[in-house]
Image: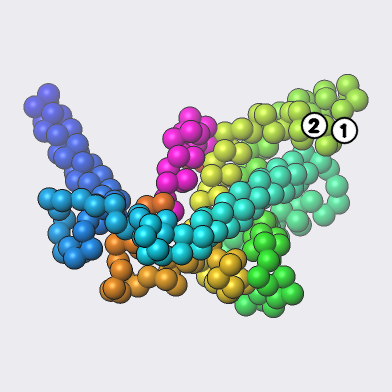
Amino acid sequence: MKKKYSLKMIAITVITMILLAISLFPFYYLIVQSVTPWDKVDKVLAPTEFTMRSYEYLIGKGGASNSTMWLKALFNSFIVAFPTAVISVAIGLAIGYSVSKLKFRGGRLIMNTLLFQMFFPVIILLVPRYMIAKPLANSYAGMIIPMCISIWAIFMYINYFKTIPNEMFEAAKIDGAGDIKILWRIALPITKSVTTIVFLSIFMQRWCELMWDMLIAPDIKMQTLNVLISTQFKPMGAFPGPMYAASVILTLPIILLFLCFSKYFKEGISFMLK
């Protein structure tokens, strides 16, 4: 029995390591190609020499590139992704608390309507959303406001608040606290694990958004880093090295955020699996 159990565990471990290596290989390839000499990019998996030429191209060393353009794109990515995530969390928290804890006529209808929208792919709303937001084209408002309502975030908060006893909020109301104070002083602290995973997920989704940004902000001064990579470089173009370097820079904020908030992220994942 012990022998069979050991062989089973070894087999599971080996398969897991193989799957892990397959999932991590694209990241390895991305990083390696970003520091590979240009004449060997996409030709070797383990280069014997390395160079920072691709990164120097992005910062404009020696006049090779317009560094201001890339820095502006990186700034645009932050100025769009961060407010979108913060506003989405605030809206999701408020609606989730209202629907699950406040008794009012039409609350169930609102919840069912919100959940009904989760069955439709976001792509079908792209054209109507653009026609509504067209007056805000080439502006931060046009890139942020239409993306601020996340049905998934609202769904997460509704389900989390259902696990919290109503007595906690009723006691706060007896002490004279209003709904805004309850949201800020009670609801937000006790939902920090869910808030973290919602914030990181929406930030990552907005950070990597491509189609909406290309549609609503075609002006190169308003383009995010993700859009600039797709428009400036082609996979089989003359400068694939800088494309990999820019992609590495694009992934760094996501990795740093995950490392900083991994504890709460794991707690949020545990709640989702319950």
- The residue that label 1 is drawn on is 178
Marker count (numbered):
2
Q: Nearer the viewer, residue 125 or 86?
A: 86
Residue 39: percent from left, percent from top: 19, 65
Residue 72 visible somewhere in the drawing: yes
Residue 216: percent from left, percent from top: 62, 72
Q: Nearer the viewer, residue 53 or 206?
A: 53
> Is residue 266 found inside the magenta-colored segment of the image?
yes
Q: Where 142 sits versus 127, above or below?
A: above
Secondary structure type for disc 1: loop
Is 259 on the left or on the right of 115, as rendered?
left
Residue located 42% across and 43% down the image: 255
Rate crowding at label 2 as few (under 14), some (14 to 19) or many (20 or more) other CA atoms within 10 Å.
some
CA distance separating discs 2 and 1: 6 Å
Q: What residue type is disc 1 on?
A: Gly
Bounds of the magenta segment: 250-271
Is 254 on the left or on the right of 112, as rendered?
left
Residue located 41% across and 51% down the image: 249
Question: Is label 2 in contact with label 1 (beta carbons under 8 Å)?
Answer: yes
Residue 23: percent from left, percent from top: 28, 50
- The residue that label 2 is drawn on is 182
Rate crowding at label 1 as few (under 14), some (14 to 19) or many (20 or more) other CA atoms within 10 Å.
few
Residue 193: percent from left, percent from top: 57, 33
Q: Where 214 sits versus 82, above or below?
A: below
Secondary structure type for disc 2: helix
Q: Nearer the viewer, residue 221 or 152?
A: 221
Residue located 46% across and 64% down the image: 66
Residue located 32% across and 58% down the image: 54
> Is residue 223 found inside the magenta-colored segment of the image?
no
Q: What residue type is disc 2 on?
A: Ile
Q: Which mark is residue 26?
A: none
